[in-house]
Image (cartoon, helix red, strand yellow):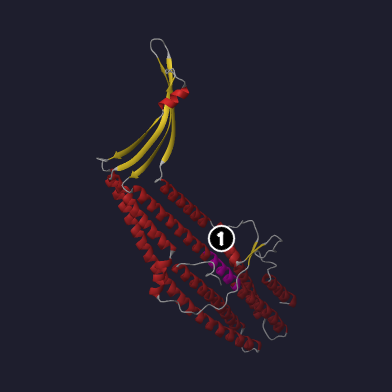
Amino acid sequence: MNRSSALHVLGAALATLFGTTSAFAQAAPATTRVIGFEQAIAIALAQNDTLRQARNAAALGELDVAQARRSFLPDLRATGQTSRAFGRADGDSTRSTSLGVSSGVTLFDGFANTASLASAKLANTANGQDLARAGETVVFTVASNFLALVQQREELRVQRENLTAQAALAAQIDTFVKAGARTIADLYQQQANVASAQLAVVQAERAAELARIDIIVTLRLDPRGTYEFVTPQISQPATTVPEKLDELITRAFATRADIRASEARLEAARQDIRVAKSTRWPIVSLAAGYGSSFSSADPDGWRDQLADERGGSVGLNLVLPLYDRGATRIAARRAEIRADSAQIDLDSLEQDVGSQVRTAILDLESARAQLTAAEAQLAAAERALEVTDQRYKAGAATLVELTESRATQVAAASAAVTARYDVEFRRRLLDYYVGGLTPESVRF
């Protein structure tokens, strides 16, 4: 292997390192949109499809409440009727017209209207809590996506540093071969190591690009656009000890918006039972009307007739149900079953929340322990690589030993990156499971 071949290997490695030959590295055009973490959260809260659907559901709930309130108000109707009567003997016809206004209001319907209003308010509250939880989910998803992007970029940095070191070693071995200090087999082997490092860089670039695509999907950005995401600076993961398990679970039960929503739906279902049973009660309503009429058979003019024929009425109506073929009993039973299902949903959700918090605490503690072990492993691997490299340069170690030592160091560096960002992810996952996650509390 001559010097030009070795330089070609070094040049190809550096080209891969700096992205000149990478399929994923593209020159950013002038129209590149730069998006930071806080801006990404704002975009997601405005454009996320799930959140938009939750807003629509909340808006519909407000309309349901408004409609239930208006059931207490009287209605107002204007009526008009005209007809023509034909005589049998002489064929004469008579035209008649009546005009009037009427109004009615329900005074008592077995508390159905009050229960319906309460149910609508509770359902609207549930929709509002669903909206709040959807917002927390969006915030958590954006934070997770940015964490994944930072992690993949750090992994890419590790692989690029490894490629730089492998390429430099290839050039050094070429010098040793020309001086007769190493065999040509070492250069061939290092050539293979450089190619392997190039492949690792390409794979890391792909993973970083996929992490960018995940953010684009979460933010609902135009897939044809070009974006640059500014990742936040993440310091050393916090070592603060979380609260006790029972305290966190208690706080989760008190703050989780989805639990509040499930509780509201349970209460709404109980109000629906009152609505179903209300048909057993009598209905009392008040009605009033006022109008007039005229006929072509009357010799007086239509104005006089309207003045003379005008009149009004006020009436109190009472409807007493006697037999409805069991409809009330069946409707009440259905409402009771739906309420029982809502109770089951609430119990199941609380059980899930408790399990989520317990698992999140365990995972966070495990991630911190793994981070400590990974950092210790990385420190030892770096020291071992330094010693092995010195021994190889002195001729006391083989290339196989140096290759194995470098592979151990790269694996340890990659494991440390994974462990570090896994701690950050687990910490935010615990906050999400406990509830109350906001754009301010999720900042890095």
Dot 1: element: helix
Where is residue 324? Give x, y as percent: 27, 40
Instruction: Name the residue nearer the viewer: 422 or 198.
Output: 422
Q: Which residue lies at the image location 37% right of the left edge and 65% below the top edge? A: 350
Where is residue 146? Give x, y as percent: 57, 67
Q: Relative to 75, say whether 12 is above or below.
A: below
Mark 1 = which residue?
44
Question: What is the chief secondary structure element of the magenta stretch?
Answer: helix
Where is residue 225? Give x, y as percent: 65, 58
Q: Which residue lies at the image location 34% right of the left edge and 59% below the top edge? A: 343
Name the residue type under label 1.
Ala
Question: Which image quarter is the C terminus in?
Answer: bottom right
Which residues are drawn in magenta?
Answer: 141-154
Specify whether 177 is left or right of 296. right
Specify whether 88 is left or right of 204. left
Residue located farthest toward the top when viewing the structure as drawn: 90
Q: Which residue lies at the image location 47% right of the left edge and 70% below the top edge? A: 431
Whether residue 40 is visible, yes or no, is: yes
Instruction: Name the residue nearer the viewer: 18 or 253.
Output: 253
Where is residue 64? Give x, y as percent: 43, 49
Whether residue 82 is visible, yes or no, is: no
Q: Relative to 29, say whether 239 is above or below.
A: below
Which image quarter: residue 208? bottom right
Instruction: Name the residue nearer the viewer: 396 or 11.
Output: 11
Q: Relative to 287, say whether 222 is above or below.
A: below
Residue 314 colored in magenta in the image: no
Question: Which image quarter is the N terminus in?
Answer: bottom right
